[in-house]
Image (tube, coloured by chain):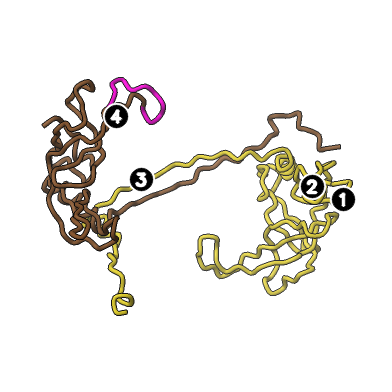
């Protein structure tokens, strides 16, 4: 049993060991260029965002309007019927107060990612975005929010063309 | 009626980006010892498994047959024997090489495993299995602790 509990033989290395050549190493840097084609549905969605409008798609058979747009209805597997302009207002479905960034840096003021049910869409197809212009302790499920857009000239056809959603009624 | 297809190709959107992938590889205790001896002394080291009677080159920490830890380091070569050879006419990017390159598996004297390397200073027609070869080492100041500290193997 003793061998089993003994620490495994290991060599701890520091930056100095490598920089100083105490251990041999090889280093390389790969450039992984990629291009992701947005496709018909998301392509139109991004185009709409650049124009300051949120597009959903409608399935007549299921009577569903969903966002972001997709080419096929995941309930009936039929093709979607039409693009539908949506309001840029909605309701907070769920949210999180996030005190670490994506790369695990601690932050004082939390980011508030939230799932927002846009007005005019069917249940359970909220979009993920950020809340802003609101105190963290004032955020509630059910809060009414409106998109805060980038100025038209600075939009680039991205979900970040909406800066964040803020409570309806706050001077937007 | 499905969504109308786009008639404006210029509207189709593509996201472009670059993933930076930085990579650093340290050799580990066994390969460190092998490549250090190659770099500093132009010596080739293996490890021996007494139980299996096999000498591994480059030396490694564990026997691949019985998984026993290997501590017995031994110098091999530098001469060896060609166990296999292939003539390469095409480069990694699919373009035809100006001159074909010979790749070989060499079993160094005293070793039971083979090392993969270039075969040089020999015409493809003169190569045969069993050919006796020796490594051509780079000069000490050019060696970095890489298998390419050996330029190639050439007929002994």
Does residue A24 show up magenta in the picture? no
Pointer 2 and pointer 4: residues touching (CB < 8 Å)? no
Q: Nearer the viewer, mark 3 or mark 1?
A: 1
Q: Choose the circle earlier in sequence order: 2 or 1.
A: 1
Residue at mark 4 = B86
Tell us which disc is closer to us: 2 or 3.
2
Chain B is shown in which shade?
brown
| Residue identified by numbered label 1 | A62
* Earlier-in-chain disc, 3 versus 1: 3
- Segment tinted magenta in the rendering: B91-101
Label 2 in the same subunit as label 4: no
Alpha carbons under labels 2 and 4: distance apart: 55 Å
Instruction: In the rendered view, tell whether residue B86 sits above or below residue A131.
Output: above
**Residue mark closest to the camera, 4 vs 1:** 4
Q: Are marks 2 and 1 in contact (CB under 8 Å)?
A: yes
| Tag 2 residue | A73
């Amino acid at each position: 049993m003793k061998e089993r509990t003994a620490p495994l033989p290991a060599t701890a290395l520091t930056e100095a060991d490598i920089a100083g050549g105490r251990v041999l190493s090889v280093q390389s840097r790969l450039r992984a260029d990629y291009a992701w084609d947005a496709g018909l549905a998301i392509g139109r969605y991004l185009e709409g965002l650049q124009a300051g409008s949120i597009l959903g798609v409608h399935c007549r058979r299921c009577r569903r309007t969903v966002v972001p747009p997709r080419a096929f209805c995941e309930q009936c597997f039929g093709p979607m019927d039409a693009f539908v302009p949506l309001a840029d207002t909605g309701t907070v479905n769920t949210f999180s107060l996030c005190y670490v960034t994506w790369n695990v840096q601690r932050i004082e003021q939390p980011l508030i990612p939230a799932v927002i049910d846009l007005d005019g869409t069917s249940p359970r197809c909220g979009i993920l975005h950020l809340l802003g212009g609101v105190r963290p302790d004032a955020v509630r499920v059910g809060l009414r929010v409106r998109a805060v857009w980038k100025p038209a000239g600075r939009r680039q056809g991205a979900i970040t063309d909406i800066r964040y959603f803020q409570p309806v009624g706050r001077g937007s | 009626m499905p969504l109308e297809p786009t008639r404006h190709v210029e509207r189709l959107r593509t996201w472009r980006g670059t993933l930076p992938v930085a990579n650093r590889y340290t050799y580990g205790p066994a390969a460190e010892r092998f490549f250090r001896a190659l770099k500093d002394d132009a010596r080739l080291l293996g490890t021996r498994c007494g139980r299996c009677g096999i000498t591994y080159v480059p030396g490694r920490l564990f026997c691949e047959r019985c998984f026993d830890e290997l501590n017995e380091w031994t110098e091999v070569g530098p001469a060896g024997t060609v166990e296999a050879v292939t003539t390469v006419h095409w480069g990694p990017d699919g373009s035809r090489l100006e001159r074909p390159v010979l790749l070989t598996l060499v079993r160094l004297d005293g070793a039971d495993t083979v090392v993969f390397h270039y075969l040089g200073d020999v015409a493809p027609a003169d190569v045969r299995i069993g050919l006796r070869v020796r490594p051509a080492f780079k000069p000490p100041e050019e060696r970095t602790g890489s298998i390419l500290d050996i330029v190639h193997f050439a007929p002994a």
